[in-house]
Structure formats: structure tokens, C-alpha cells
Amino acid sequence: MQRLMARSVSDPQVVLVVGASSGIGAETAASLASRGHQVFGSSRDPVRVQLSGVAAVRLEVTDEGSVRECIAEVIECAGRIDAVVYSAGFYAAGAAEETSPELMLAQLDAYLVGAHRVVRAVAPSMRERSKGRILFMSSSAAVAAIPFHAAYSASKAALNHYAEALRYEVEPFGIQIACMEGTGVQTGAARARRMGEGPIEAYELARGAAVAAFSKTQSSGPRPVAIARSIVRAIEARNMRPLYPRRVLGGDAPLAPGAPTADPLSQMVREVLRSSLDLRLRRFQYTERRGTRQRGRARGAFDPPGPW
């Protein structure tokens, strides 16, 4: 797998990649290391971080103590942290009505509150040095919500707004903040999917279409190494952009061979809405036919064949 120009940079940085055991985080950590940066890759199970040139560290983003211990360990080992790439999390799926408050809170904890814990732990050292970068891996779902992924969409939108507010606060201290939006990246995130408990039959058709479409975009979307290239360029740039939307990633994130060129998120939303519309139409037809049958029976003039 080809990574971004595997050569040493003149000004190597100390980078902590949060969520480096797989997907975008793993490719980013490996790409940064191949270019000569001193990279620490975190996971709740550091044994899973098996990357050449990357030091594995334990970090559980939902645990305040674990976050602070990890940041302190990296600073003690390297003397500083120049940049953080936040790429941890899972995604929740299912109708909003099926999503328990506990699952909604867990989703927000992984993407928003977890990111906040990392910021609170690393910002003081960056502020003291008047230098630092924090890049959050976001999603196009932050600006175009995905049906039956309300918790995921809301958490990514919250992360974007958090990053924007944070940027205004810390820029005077030399700390740059950015969000990078990906769409349907081939990360294998379906393995980390959590469905809402107690499925409701009324949502079955549209929910199934939404989850299947989301999985489909991940099989034909950008490869993680392509997004990693964009992250490396952002970390090495003189100044990071506040936001890297998907359209900006287009040149850096080629689709898999034979994949459609249209935005997979737009395709998915259209497919889900079409399925939902088909369901409503069928129910309308069912209601109309049942009503006609009942009226006909009352007159003794109509009895349609077959069960309804």
C-alpha cells in the first residue's frame, strides 16, 4: 500500500494519533512515521497497535484518568507533543426512537466528550510552548445528517462546532485546530457498529436500507490511506485549514476501482428516503384497499380476493 512520499521531513514533529489500532488512525500513524515524525499511536488495547516506527500507548477516551496518564507519558518520553490527531470512536445506527439515552450518551462520549478530554489534557503544554496542532477526524454527516444514524450525525456535528469554538479560543496561543470530513471511508467501521436496542417494526424497511447503504459506501469509498495523505499534509502544512470538507479531499482520496464517482453520502440518503417513501406508499395503498373492502362489505357489493 502506497503512502505519502515515504521520506524524512526537515522538521520532524511529535504526534499522538488517538485511535491508531485500525482504519484511518492506523494509516495516519504509519504514514507520519514513514516521513520521520516521532509518532505515538494510542488504543484502549495498545497490543493492537502493530505499526513500524510507532510507539504504542494506552488511552481510553472515555476515561479521564487514562487520557491524562497517556498525555503525561508521551510528554515524559518525547519532551513535548506537537500535534494530536483524534480518530477514535464507533458509530451507532438505528432509528432515533430505537436509540436509548445510554447509547446516545456513549456516542457523544466517544466523539465529543472524549475529544474534549484529550484537549483539556494536552492544551496546557501546547499553550506554554505557544505551538501545537489538533486535528479531529469528522464526517460529512456533520453537515448532512444520515437517516437512521441520528446519534452519529449529531455527535459529528457537535464535534465540528466544538472545534470551531475551540479554534477561536486557542489560536492566540499558537494552537491550530482543524476538522477533516470523510465520507464512507473503507475503515471496516461496521465491525464497531452498535445498533439501537429494541427494534421497532415500523422502521424495519427503511432502517435496513440505511444500514445496508452505509455499509455499501464503505466498500466503495476512499481507502484509509487516501485520507491519511490529507491528514499528513495538514499536519505538515505551515497553517492548517480550519475545515477540510470532503470536496477538498477529492484529489487526495481516490475511490476504489470501479466505484461510483458521485458523493456516496448523497447516494445513501437518496436510497434511504426512496425506501422510506416506498414503505409509506405501500401502507397508504393497503389502507385505501382495506377501507374500500370494508365499505364494499357494508353494501354487500365488494369482497376483494386475498388477505389484507
Image: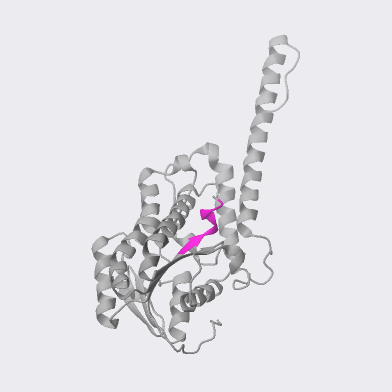
Query: Which residue is pictured at 51% across the width and 54% down the height?
Result: 142
Query: Which residue is pictured at 70% across the width and 28% down the height?
Result: 306
- The x, y position of residue 184, in whole percent, is 56, 62
Determine the residue located farthest toward the top in the rendered image. Answer: 299
| Residue 136 is covered by the magenta coloring | no
- Asked where in the image residue 163 lies, by quadrant, the reply is bottom left
Q: Is residue 86 visible?
A: no
Q: Report the colour scheme.
A: one colour
- The x, y position of residue 144, in whole percent, is 56, 52
- Asked where in the image residue 51 lies, by quadrant, the reply is bottom left
Residue 261 vs 149, above or below: the answer is below
| Residue 138 is covered by the magenta coloring | yes
Residue 300 vs 228, above or below: the answer is above
Q: Is residue 82 visible?
A: yes
Whether residue 155 sits left or right of residue 277 in the image: it is left
Determine the residue located farthest toward the right in the rendered image. Answer: 301
- Asked where in the image residue 250 lies, by quadrant, the reply is bottom right
- Residues 63 and 134: in front is 134
- The x, y position of residue 110, in whole percent, is 38, 58
Query: Which residue is pictured at 45% across the width and 42% down the height?
Result: 98
Magenta residues (range):
137-144
Residue 71 vs 272, above or below: the answer is below
Q: The C terminus appears in which quarter of the rendering?
A: top right
Determine the residue located farthest toward the front in the rendered image. Answer: 172
- Residues 133 and 198: in front is 133
Query: Which residue is pictured at 35% across the width and 72% down the height?
Result: 42
